[in-house]
Amino acid sequence: SEERIKETHYDYALKALRATGRLVAKVAIDSEKVDFLTEVTDPERQKKIQKIADAALAGKARVDQDELRTALASIGDRARLVALGDAYFADRFHDDPNVNRQKYPAAIEFYQAANDRDKVRRVIEAQLAETTPDEWDMRLHLGPAVASLNDPKLTAKLDAYVTKRIAEGPNRREARPWLQLKEAPKLSGPDSPGTGLMAPNHVPVPSAIKSTLGSEEAIKEALVKSAGLTAGERKARARDGHELMAEGNLWAAYEAFRDAHDREGLIAVGDRYVATGNAHNSIKPYLAAAHLTKPGEQ
């Protein structure tokens, strides 16, 4: 549907904008999912991310919450991260109980990205008081969130909940994840992995562009190979890139700018793809640009 296409374009646009920044970390979750985190400092691209976030806050755009959270983290926008966490938390009493349950983890993740530990604590206490957490709640967000806070009182509350559930039935499945977490090596506190602004949030890469990100090694290999070109050859390839882009042959222009190590040309190709509604094709140009040093940098 047209609405679904528009929603997808927001997600692609955010991912493309993030890919223009400085690569901070890449985390392989499994064979299917990869996280890559960047720091976006360009003011115009920051404004574009903020514009999409504001539209989502106003209910005028449907955006994947994982992509939105990670994009805001890439520009260090704590205010909007907290505002979105507040919005999810305020909307937790939804008519649909299945949707209701999803609001707690969403709020926790936005607050964690903003490193607002007090609000993470508030959501956890509310969920324990207002719902009956199941196995997946405990495994995916509630248990890890409590462990990350290293708060004795909150830990005691979850212990009490788990103890009560075990008393109701010795094999309660929702007890297992928490007990396993308590036995694992300590990974709590404000500096622990997976907490705070710019920390890996294990955001799944949308299936439509998994193959693009999976070819990052090929992009790096092409950059290494073209590093052997002379200055004259690079200038010629850059001229080719500008001519091809003017003709509308964006993919060939991407390859030319990549060979020329022309960072601005690669970003221009990515921007043109986004502007023409083909944001999924912008990932490779942006990713190649992210691997090139800006002029004046070591």
Image: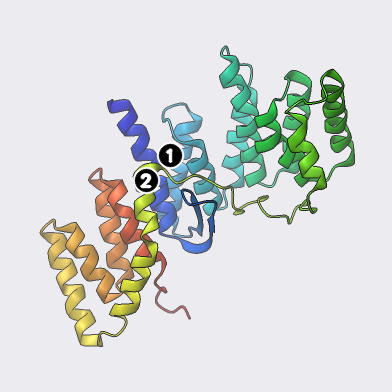
Please give the residue where the numbered disc 2 appears in the rendered image.
13
| Type of amino acid under label 2 | Ala
Q: Residue at x 21, y 70 (%)?
A: 256
**Foreground disc of the pair 1, 2:** 2
> In the picture shown, does residue 221 fall above or below 176?
below
Q: Where is residue 127 in the image (x, y as percent from the top left)?
A: 73, 25
Q: How many marks?
A: 2
Q: Are marks 1 and 2 in contact (CB under 8 Å)?
A: yes
Which badge, 1 or 2, is on the more N-terminal residue?
2
Q: Can you tell which quarter of the image residue 125 is in?
A: top right
Q: Residue at x 49, y 63 (%)?
A: 23
Please give the residue where the numbered disc 1 appears in the rendered image.
52
Query: Gap between marks 1 and 2, in whole Å?
Result: 9 Å
Q: Where is residue 48 in the image (x, y as percent from the top left)?
A: 41, 47
Q: Where is residue 67 in the image (x, y as percent from the top left)?
A: 48, 43
Q: Position of residue 273 (x, y in %)?
A: 25, 51
User: Which corner quadrant holds the N terminus?
Assistant: top left
SS of the residue under disc 1 = helix
